[in-house]
Amino acid sequence: MHIIGIVVEYNPFHNGHFYQIQQIRKKYPGCAIVVVMSGHFSQRGLPCVLDKFSRSEMALACGVDLVLELPVVYATASAERFSQAAVSLLHKSGIVDILCFGSETPDLALMQDLASLLLEEPPFVSAQIKNYLSQGESYPRARLLSIKEYLSTYTKDTVDTLETILSSPNNILSIEYLKALKHLNSPIQPFPIQRHIAGYHDTTIEGPIASATAIRQNLALGEGHKAKGSMPEPAYHLLNQYTPKSINLDDYSELFHYKMIMSNLESLYAVWDIPSNLCRSLYHASKTLQPLSEIVNQVTSKTYTRATVQRAIIRILLSVQTDDLLALEKLNWIPYIHVLGCNKTSTALLSLLSQKSEVPLLINVSKDENNLDDLGQKLFNYELQASKLYALLSQDAILLEKDYKYHPIRR
């Protein structure tokens, strides 16, 4: 039996996600599907529309067999680190043999070539990236321009194709997944599925396939009913049952300002993966006590994208320490696997995971937490902090201790 891994946010689960699951089961009848899902916060550095437990239930109700959590420090990281950690988790599970991902470009061979190029970055590309960064370009843009120069001897059509690939969000993630597989020398085989109809950032719902961005926008406007035709019935039912509270940046303005007032620049420099210039910009902008959305607008630039700034704010609020993450990087990121959910019919898969996993499992957290080493405990503590932060923002006291009380087996 094939066991297929997918890296997801399901923010929220929609028909595009369901299409992917259908395509997997069409190609691999009888397979099991394991997802690595972001927790309470997304890769854009924003709170998800529903908590991780509710989104796990959505996934299980719509055909997923097992839901594993991507730790918050990686779920809110750059595309490269997000992908490295997610693929490492699937690799260390010891049970996944195929990684499925959606991409705008179906050319796996070309993406494999790009992944190899970026993994073993030629000196010319490295030097040009530094040059473009010094000119104020964002890292994704600097990388794109550098690769185009490196491949300037190729035909114009090939270079244009590369620009399309490296400018599309899901293609970028796809290449990062392939890089991670190569870095780990993993036996997991890639299986891309071409995305259909809705674009990653589309903001309108005009048919059965809508982007998560469009659905979130309608939820924020109090028009969640418009998403009914764009979500599988079980997912839409759960969305209505849990009635998500729309959380925006300004909802945690005071938390951010308090954190900055109680910090100094030296302590901010110790926070993981935030450039010192961005630390200074956020630190000085916070002294105006403006709403957080205004500060994000002010600090966002050609160099630092909006998502980069929002991710930095989450890391600051959680005080994610560079020393902890450097130590985890040496262990290929993942010191434990947290099981968020499992269908009752898939408990044999959970048993197999218990046998094959290279790292301790957290299933019954109150008991299994004792099996973590110091680094594992530090990483999981960030997860507990994220749950408390999300509980505060969503005004849901149940979430404060739910990591310890939630039963992962869906009845």
Image (cartoon, grey):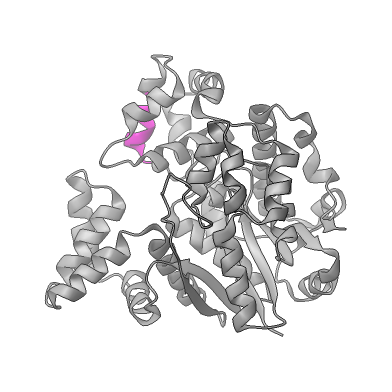
Query: In the displayed structure, does residue 223 sit left or right of residue 50?
Result: left
Quarter of the image for the N terminus: give it. bottom right
Locate the C terminus by quadrant. Answer: bottom right
Q: In the drawing, does residue 336 fall left or right of residue 165?
A: right
Q: How many marks?
A: 0
Q: Quadrant of residue 403?
A: top right
Picture quadrant where residue 31 is located = bottom right
Q: Which range is magenta?
A: 275-283
Instruction: Determine the residue located farthest toward the top in the rendered image.
Output: 288
Q: Is residue 405 left or right of residue 98?
A: right
Q: Main secondary structure of the magenta part?
A: helix
Task: Inspect the magenta stretch and tell me whether residue 246 lies in it.
Answer: no
Look at 17% across and 74% down and name the residue there: 157
Q: Give the residue drawn at x 38%, y 14%.
A: 288
**Does residue 279 show up magenta in the picture?**
yes
Name the spot of residue 308 as percent of width and height, x first: 40, 42
Q: Is residue 55 placed above or below 173 in the rendered structure?
A: above
| Residue at the image position 48 percent from the left and 46 percent from the top | 213
Above or below 86: residue 1: below
- The reply to whether residue 294 is in sight is yes
Q: Position of residue 269 (x, y in %)?
A: 43, 35
- The percent position of residue 250, horizontal first and vertical second, equals 50, 23
Asked if one can make out residue 43 in the rendered structure from this viewpoint, the answer is no
Direction from residue 196 to residue 87 in the image, left or right: right
Q: Which of the pair 72/155 is nearer the observer?
A: 155
Observer-nearest of 140 and 359: 140
